[in-house]
Amino acid sequence: MMSALTPGFAEPVSGAQACFRLVLDAMARPGQVHALGGVAAPAPLCDAAAAVVLTLLDHETPLWLDPEAEAAKAWIAFHTGAPITVDPARSMFALALSQSVMESWHGLPPGTDEAPETSATVILQVVSLTTGTDFVLEGPGMRAPETLTVDGLPPDFAAIWRRNHAQYPRGIDLILCAGNQIAALPRSVAVRKG
Amino acid sequence: MKGYNFAYLDEQTKRMIRRALLKAVAIPGHQVPFGSREMPLPYGWGTGGIQVTAAILGADDVLKVIDQGADDTTNAVSIRRFFARTAGVRTTTATAEATVLQTRHRIPEKTLREDQIIVYQVPQPEPLWRLEPSRVETTRMHGLADYGLMHVKLYEDIARYGQISIAYDYPVMVNERYLMSPSPIPAFDNPKMDMMPALQLFGAGREKRIYAIPPWTRVRSLDFDDHPFRPINAAHPCGLCGATDAYLDEVVTDDRGGRLFVCSDTDHCADRRAAGHVGAQGLREAAE
């Protein structure tokens, strides 16, 4: 079966750079929501998730792909060359459409005390970053506690994140994507329900 | 520039550095290893900072590069020219105009803003290296947050000299978790790192490490309750602009003991003089 793949960034160099700067700013300032542009995402990915994938993934980054996102597999493989692994423990990134990835983080590596950077980064597609449940964030990157509104996180997300944050400096970093918007939750941040 | 990718580095290298930067931001003060590349200048000339700058720089950025506070020294001039040629970005000497600032051994006097990023060139990212030569051991110490060795060193300084004898590269605790080298900036600049509105990125090319401090993050210079941290500066006003709150360089002016103390931050000094501030040397010259 041959189906036409949609293109990646129209301008790969400037597209990836612009997207990276927004991801960097989102990671450095948790609670800030940024709008990305410029990618025609393959179903079922949203534009923001597709742009983040193009920006950060390549042949060096094993990806655990949510079975629900199977339809985007060929697009990701073609544009990034990322090896897609069925074993979450071997992945550097996870791309998830459903909250089920947060059930004990699916066995994704949290890193070690000596090399906490070997943890996985989860790119999670949610319903919305403008409406939904309020979460209050505190930690580096924020002068005062920030509020992040997300629709699509599990009801007990604050408790799930507390366990993740408690392992600091180990832990999972989360990039949330909805439509063309992104926000990030680095492991350094404490989250409570607003 | 023909024959090169935008900002010199290839896209795969930029992605690798970008991934390291995101981890570094997520774990403030932790040194993330990265695949440092050969650059068209030797180690020790800012290859780490250049690689970080190349990975973040976009066509709309305005770049400022300083070396010991000055925009017009060899290292600053050549790095600025490097990016002007390979990325075609606009460069500036004005701190307020820049979106990305690369620095060797100073933080500008002007308070940086939220929309700015400062990139430090780092020769030795490991704050414990003079005390413990083994990387395996220091990595373990960071893992356990066991920084007793550094406290003993500071204590021994006080016992021997009556004060902590570190004038530059003064160790800091980031987010109360990681001991970090602020790069060889004067201890005078350390307080500027604390709760800085701008994102701070650090690149060590030879040592192949990247680390970061997110904006609004607590950075504490190590000290003791009875020996609090004290930034050191020459006890003079700037000879050119009269500033009393800026870090000063000592310039030997003759062979009869003549000395001139001037702002190390050339942009700050020029701004002040343009605004009408005059120091002792300026007054002397005006009188002649």
Image (cartoon, coloured by chain):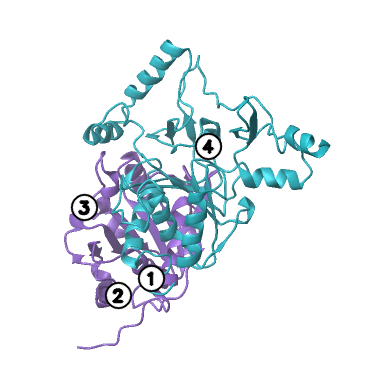
- Label for residue B4? 1
- Label for residue B33? none
Q: CA distance from mark 4 to mark 2?
A: 41 Å
Q: CA distance from mark 2 to mark 3?
A: 26 Å
* Residue B119 on image: x %, y %: 47, 49
Hey, what amino acid is under mark 3?
A: Gly
Subunit of label 4: B
The residue beneath circle 4 is B194
Is B163 on the left-hand or right-hand side of A1? right
The residue beneath circle 3 is A107
Q: Nearer the viewer, mark 3 or mark 4?
A: 4
Q: Nearer the viewer, mark 2 or mark 1?
A: 1
Q: Residue at x 32, y 62 (%)?
A: B13
Hey, what amino acid is under mark 2?
A: His
Disc 2 to disc 3: CB gap under 8 Å? no
For the colour purple, the matching chain is: A
Q: CA distance from mark 4 to mark 1?
A: 38 Å
Does B240 sit above or below residue A55? above
Q: CA distance from mark 3 to mark 4?
A: 36 Å
Q: SS of the residue at dot 3?
A: helix
